[in-house]
Image: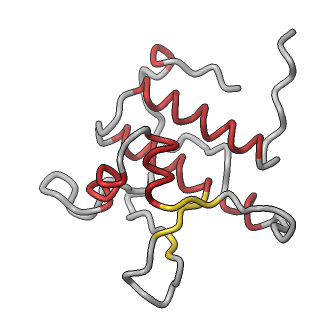
Amino acid sequence: MTDLRAADVTELPDFPGYMITEEMIAARDWTRGARPTYHMNEVAKFFFAMSSSWLRLRLKADENHPETWFVNPDGTRMRFRRNDPDKAVSARVFWLSDVEPMVWSLVRFGGIDPDRLARVLRVVEAQGVLYELLPSSPDPS
């Protein structure tokens, strides 16, 4: 697992390079297993240990975030999938590859601290290993 601690995150990179990418997920044949996708409440609880209301508020604009809290390193707004892409009110569906950009955006905006960043990245990495998108870490013993 990544050994990232708050003390290691003194200066945040403009673009961190992500462990899990959309291409990694799209390239796999998921017909024999579940795709690493999550609903709003799952992302909020599982990755951030927060409520779905907390996440919904960060998806909306506010006085300090004219579009949303979730902005790509190039300044463009992050776009998230919906269960039914043809319906704007359909439930959002997040891929595992969405979580890392989300957490880095929250850190850049001061929405979470480096300690939580490190914890979320460890959960992302663990999910990547479970879904066999990342290699398992060698046994430390």
Q: Is 125 situated left or right of 64 in this image?
A: right
Q: Quadrant of the C terminus?
A: top right
Q: Nearer the viewer, residue 42 or 73?
A: 42
In the rendered image, the residue lying farthest to the top is: 141
Q: Is 1 situated left or right of 71 in this image?
A: right
Residue 120: image location, x then y, percent: 52, 35
Residue 95: image quadrant is bottom right
Question: How many numbered circles does the render carry?
Answer: 0
Q: Taking 32 as reference, is 85 above or below it?
A: below
Question: Who's the residue at 81% across and 62% down the image?
Answer: 33
Q: Is 28 situated left or right of 58 in this image?
A: right
Residue 127: image location, x then y, percent: 68, 43
Q: Nearer the viewer, residue 66 or 115?
A: 115
Residue 52: image location, x then y, percent: 36, 54
Question: Who's the residue at 77% across and 49% down the image?
Answer: 131
Question: Who's the residue at 83% across and 33% down the image?
Answer: 136
